[in-house]
Each structure stands twice: as C-alpha cells, then as structure tokens.
Amino acid sequence: MSVFDRLQKQLDIQKREHGISALELADLPPNLRKIMRLMLREVVLKYTDLCHAVEAMPAANRLSKPELDSALKTLVEQNWLLCTGEGEFLSYRVNLRRKAGSSLNKDIWASLDNRIAGSKSQEAPNQKINPGG
Amino acid sequence: MSKIISVHSFRGGTGKSNTTANLAALLALQGNRVGVVDTDVQSPGIHVLFGLDESQMAHSLNDYLYGKCAITETAVDVTSNLKVPVKGKVFLIPSSIKAGEIARVLREGYDVGLLNDGFQDLLEGLKLDFLLIDTHPGLNEETLLSIAISDALVIIMRPDQQDYQGTGVTVEIARKLGVPAMLLVVNKVPQAFDPAEVKAKVERIYNCTVAAVLPHSDEMMALASAGIFSLQYPDHPVAAKYKQLAAQLMA
C-alpha cells in the first residue's frame, strides 16, 4: 500500500467518524430526510440521476430544484453525504457513521476472549460451541 | 422492482424470526426470489428455522462486515431445506453463532455503511424480488437503518401492556423516517380474545393497519422452531393468516 493509499484510507476513516448515525436520520428536517432515504436505497447517485429521482417522487413529497440544491449543500457541509466528481460526473453517497464499539473496560473483553479461547481448547476436535450455553 | 421488508418488534420473543421465515417461504412458494438477512448479530437465531447448522455456514454476515468476503458469498440457498416443492428461491444470510464473533461485534462495532451497501448488493447480485430483514428487538443502529431503507415495515407485537408501549415508539420512529408502508401483526393472541376486537383496539391506538391477528397456537409452540410452520401445517388457521400477510406484501 503506497503512502497516498494510506493517507486516503486515513481520510476516509476520519470522514466516517463524522458521518450520520441511523439514530440521527429520524430527527432530520423533512427535506433532508427525503434525500437521505433516497440515497440510502441508491447508494451512489449522480446529480442528474438524483434530480430525476426527485422528479419521480409523489407530488406531495417532491422537492423543487432550489430545495434539492439547498438540502444537498447542507448534507455535504455536515459530512452526511460525500460528494465526488465535477460537472456531469458529480455524484453523492451517504456517509453513515461507524457503529461504535463497547466502552467497557478492555480487561473485561480480554477476560471474555480468554474464556472463549479456553472453552474452545477444551472441546473435542469436532464439537461445536452451543450458543445457548 | 425489488422490495425491502423489515420485520421488527420492540421487545423480544414476539415471534419475529418465525414470521420472517414463514413470509420468506410463502413468498418463495409464489415463485419469488427471496433473501433473508439476520441482522440480529447479538442474538442470531433464524438459521434454526431454515434447518441450517454452523457447519453449513461457510461465511456469515460478520465475515462480510469485517471485510473477509463479499456479502453474496455469505448467502446460503436454503430452498431445499424447506422440504416442499417451491417455485422460487430462499437465500439466508446468517449471522455468526460463534461466541467470539458475537463478542467482536459488541466490542469493536462495525461499518454501518457497509451493511447498507450489502443490502443493495444482495438485491442485485442474487436478483431478489424481496429482501427480508430480521432485526434485533428494540431500537439500535442496524434496526433504524433497516427501517429507513424499507419499502414496508412489519411490526410484530403481542397483546401485552409492555408491547403496546414499545410498539408506539417503533411506529413513531417509522413515521418520522417516512416508511412507505407499515403493517402491524398482533401475535400469540390468547384464544379467549376476540380477534376483531384486538384488531380494532390496536388500529385505534396506533392509527395504523393491522395486517393480521395471529392466535396463540400450541402446534406452533410444539414445532419449537424445527421448521417453517405454514409449510408443515398448510391448513392451519395461523398459516392462513401468514398467507394473507404475504399476499399484502406482494400487492
């Protein structure tokens, strides 16, 4: 992996840390939420395709072009949508925040790992772990 | 166009996985290609209903989330496990039942964006008509994500005071997220209750369609997740209700 690849990976990780959590989606203003829902289903959309998708929405839900542009600007500024390319290649994708791990003391997890490893080594070679305990 | 359907309940033990498995089988019976994702990574279980054991899971959803394989590689074709002739297909994307891998998810978290990408890859890669998402009870990241991307949300509840309150929370969130269709299923209703009364009461409380009122069934309890109920008891009243529900989702 080159230095540039590593830097790019680091930048991607930093962006993910500032992404939106699924919990926050519900509290977005309606126009932002509509765009985010659409983008979640499409994963990546070019701006022109996004405009078409919005036009295809039911009349009651449809955003005008200024409303769409304003929503996109806000979502990109917040790092909730990632924007790449220019002109006809301008495209967007949702930036979902990574699900946080446990904040429990690391010793607790180390102890659990040891116990799991211990129980595995005590098993007969073909015996399975019974998750029901 | 393919549909994503999330099956959710606020509390555990409502019959969520059973409902998901029955719907998957009935949709496949009608010739559909159906994917079932077990996003209950903390307490997976739906694989049992499809007769899948650990030795048959070459990969799991956990492997995909930690970059070990593509999500389509985790899909197991469980159609033959249904043990009845089925026109369509059922693919299960199981979560790992290894204690160490469950602990890893809890300890490290995971990339939620990758989970969403995975749902879309499954629709495309397996040419699915339906993707059913079996969620973890309550509200968490993966549950809210699956609700947000769904075309339809099926909320399972029992006629129990704790379920009534929790279901209210889920309905409110689903409305905020603008889920296009929301169907309530009241499950495990005691035989002494009048189903019409239960339906009317629940619809009045949540101002939401009750798609089915499923009576408590001793046969279902006796089956004990050892198979798909509506395939093993096709003439049972509960199977008839599942068929109605599947028909509503196909409409």
Image (tube, coloured by chain):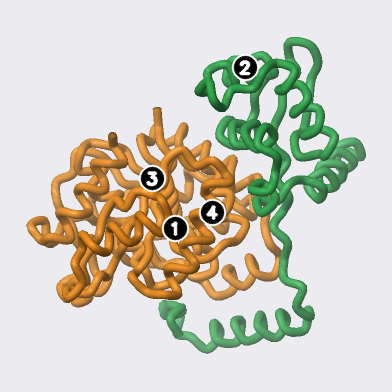
- Asked whether the residues under marks 1 and 3 belong to the same chain, the reply is yes
Depth check, mark 1 against mark 2: the one in front is 1
Residue nearest the observer in this picture, B102 or A18: A18
User: Seen in the image, is A84 located left or right of residue A115?
Assistant: right
Amino acid type of the residue that numbered disc 3 sits on in the rendered structure: Gly
Quadrant of the rendering where the N terminus of chain B is positioned: top left
User: Seen in the image, is B104 located left or right of residue A57?
Assistant: right
Relative to A109, is B29 above or below? above
The tag on residue A49 is: 2
Q: Which residue is mark 4?
A: B172
Query: Mark 3 vs mark 4: which is more N-terminal?
Result: 3
Depth check, mark 3 against mark 4: the one in front is 4
Q: Secondary structure at mark 3?
A: strand
Q: Which residue is mark 1?
A: B8
State how far apart marks 4 and 1 are (Cα): 13 Å
The tag on residue B35 is: 3
Tint of chain B: orange
Amino acid type of the residue that numbered disc 1 sits on in the rendered structure: His
Kindly tell me whether residue B93 is visible in this rendering.
Answer: no
